Image: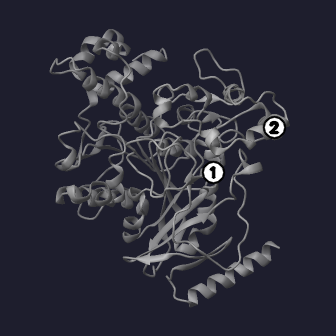
Amino acid sequence: MRQIVLQVFLLWAIADAMAGGQSARVSIDAGRLEGAAQNGVVSFKGIPFAESPTGKLRWRPPQPVKVWKGIRKADAYGHDCMQLPAPGEAAPAGTTARDEDCLYLNVWRPGHEAKRRLPVMVWIYGGGFLNGGASPAVYDGSAFAQRGVVFVSFNYRLGRFGFFAHPALTAEDPHGPLGNYGFMDQIAALQWVRRNIAAFGGDPENVTLFGESAGGSSVHTMMTSPMARGLFAKAIVESGGGRDAAQPRALLARDAKPGAPPPGETVGLEFAQSKGIAGTDAKALEALRSLSPEALVDNLNIITRRTGHSTASTYPGPMIDGKVVKETAQAAYEAGRQMKLPMMIGANDNDLAYPQGNTVDELLAPFGARLQEARREYDPEGKNNIHDVGVRVASDRAEVEPARFLARLLTGQGQRIYLYRFSYVAQVMRKEWPGATHASEVPFVFDTVAARYGESLTPEDRKMADATIARWVGFAKTGKPDVEGGALWPAFDPHHELMMNFTAHGLAMETDPLKARLDLTEGTYSDARGERR
């Protein structure tokens, strides 16, 4: 049967090639697709990479797509995954439809015939594992395709659809995998790329996986998950953390350690009880699968979770399940169990900044005996401004120092790492932002700054976007983020610790201007682990 399917696939491919080479038609393992051509780019949107995860497939690993007959139109995004939109999102959705049926991906490729297979870039969006999707205009892959890359984006399940555990689910499938269905979707999308990307002119042996925020954290998970091994060749992490203390993970079923998040199954039981569902048998699971999508969302998004809304306590987030996620990323990296691939790692200079404290003294308390030194670094002008100090402390702790920590750690293991800092602020925002905020680099990476800033866009902003995407594409093509005529970007060297800084004055290879602050932040992590410095 498999041989017959392959023969049909080959006949389709030959027919499509005869129809016009780099046409808007392509044949993949599930059937034929017709995309759309515009501005020298051919795009294919709304391609199912797994069956709809609804009904009995809710909280199941993604299942193979059934082969379709005829030519499937692929000129519009599929549904974004079910969620409660968050106000003020940096990447507003490009669709109005959000649905549990959401496992779709999109491909952009150059419109011209290539002499050889092209490098591939696969994007994972952020949103705290509660919000986000592949449809926002700032995630459009056209600029990558125009620069000779085959670009792929995809949806993965969010919230309780993507991360959920319950004893009844464990009883149904005791050998798993369980709990991290959103990560399973990511792996399924990468497997789809492995099988099908050559049909779009892409090279399955030259795939760069990259993501921002929760997407960057997901890249860490894929780097360290045994189930993702061999599915990509390079990785880029944008503001993806990497420290356990900044991103704790719950266990799925085992007893939690004191102070650790409650196990996923415990959280799942509490959610079920909040909906009037008792027990741990098949009947309880049937009732859970019968809940409406809206009941599962239950007013949960990235904002309500951060502000401690009551519904947040019944959502576990990503878990250590023993199969997809066997350990935290930090534990895997420290033990050298990750894939040894070239990586770009970085953060923004005013990154994920949610202050934890009501006074400057509270904000600086984690620095302990180094309090006065911390006050000099974080409040150099002595203004005692709680917001400004809190933003700096939180940004360094959540994103900026963890990026440097991983650059040091992985370089010490012989891995080739390129460290960056994004400090550029669009001109229209310079009076409002003291630095580059969380996710503000994304439109520059994608060269979609026109979609983000519209008429406020300046020639300087356009120039920075061109310089930024060029570095990302250079890394995807060669494993080194260098461009012809541009400043060399050498791999991180622990003896000099230079990084590439994307600044208002252009790109600068320099010693970290935040080094003293990051050294202090590193000390808080070392103190918490009882390490000597």
N-term mark: 2 or 1: 1
Check if mark 2's residue and mark 1's residue have beta carbons within 8 Å: no
- Under mark 2, the amino acid is Pro
In the displayed orientation, state which residue is furthest to the bottom: 18
User: Is residue 418 toward the left or the right of residue 247 in the image?
Assistant: left
Q: Nearer the viewer, mark 2 or mark 1?
A: 1
Q: Can residue 531 be seen in the rendering of this structure?
A: no
- Kindly indicate the quadrant of the structure image that contains residue 463: bottom left
Q: Which color scheme did the rendering employ for the protein?
A: one colour
For the residue carrying disc 1, how many other residues have a C-alpha within 10 Å: few (<14), some (14-19), or many (20+)? Answer: many
Pick the residue in front: 251 or 279. Answer: 279
Instruction: Tell me the residue at 61%/31% (across/down).
Output: 316
Name the disc covering residue 350, or none. none
Location of mark 2 (residue): 174
Q: At which x and y percent is residue 456?
A: 21, 55
Q: At which x and y percent is residue 513?
A: 23, 34
Q: Is residue 357 above or below residue 391?
A: above
Location of mark 1 (residue): 100
SS assignment at label 1: loop
Pick the residue in front: 511 or 386. Answer: 386
